[in-house]
Image: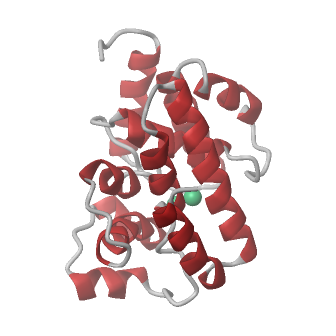
């Protein structure tokens, strides 16, 4: 394994709950498998995967305070649901604590919770890997999304977003216009209405 990734794993292992660490390993390996499929650099995908939840450590109880402390910019949506701040904070830690300078990796970590319209292939790989990794609990359509991830990544992004929106609605959470707009955007892409 890449020496940098090995070092990061050793550092985060004692700082994470067991299930979180298992999830991190799952995302890292799933991201590398998807990188093979989409002819992307597997080491970059693994690095983004291993660090995507690096802000979810025992010592970080207050994402808002940490973001304020380091002057990290967050969206209104992230401020409304502070657990989402582990994405921008994670990108900050990846750069300043683990020395990652590759903007592609930092961006993939930054957008792994809410996605966006301007996603690179690495962003999509991490976004999808986060949802389909082996320790992820069963949810509606999970096996279909796992299959789609390796056949059409845009369809997998749309399917994950659709699942997330349905979950939010079922659970009584507000679904923002930004999220609905994004859902519609990826619906059109997955139906071939946008050229990428
Ligand atoms: Fe996350
Ligand atoms: Fe995650």
Residue 193: horizontal and vertical position, in percent?
35, 9
Residue pictured at 66% horizontal, 48% vertical: 170
- How many badges with numbers are in the image? 0
Outermost residue on the right side: it is 138
Q: Nearer the viewer, residue 13 or 86?
A: 13
Farthest top residue in view? 192
For the N terminus, give its image quadrant. Answer: bottom right
Image quadrant for the C terminus? top left
Residue 184 at least partly seen: yes
Residue at the location (72% across, 63% down)? 22
Q: Is residue 46 left or right of residue 16?
A: left
- Residue at 44% over, 37% down: 124
Residue 118 position in % (x across, y down)? 27, 36
Seen at 36% across and 78% down, the residue is 97
Q: Is residue 169 visible?
A: no
In the displayed structure, 96 sits above or below 28; it is below
């Amino acid at each position: 394994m890449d020496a940098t990734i090995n070092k990061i794993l050793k550092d985060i292992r004692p700082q994470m709950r067991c299930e979180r660490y298992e999830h991190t390993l799952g995302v890292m390996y799933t991201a590398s498998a998807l990188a093979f499929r989409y002819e992307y650099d597997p080491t970059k995908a693994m690095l983004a995967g291993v660090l995507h939840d690096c802000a979810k450590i025992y010592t970080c109880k207050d994402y808002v305070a940490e973001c304020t402390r380091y002057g990290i910019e967050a969206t209104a949506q992230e401020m409304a649901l502070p657990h989402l701040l582990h994405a921008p904070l994670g990108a900050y830690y990846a750069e300043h604590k683990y020395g990652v300078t590759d903007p592609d990796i930092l961006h993939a970590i930054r957008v792994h919770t809410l996605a966006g319209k301007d996603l690179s292939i690495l962003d999509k790989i991490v976004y999808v890997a986060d949802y389909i990794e082996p320790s992820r609990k069963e949810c509606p359509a999970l096996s279909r999304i796992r299959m789609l991830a390796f056949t059409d990544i845009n369809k997998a992004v749309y399917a994950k977003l659709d699942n997330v929106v349905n979950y939010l609605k079922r659970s009584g959470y507000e679904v923002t216009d930004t999220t609905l707009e994004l859902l519609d955007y990826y619906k059109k892409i997955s139906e071939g209405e946008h050229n990428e």
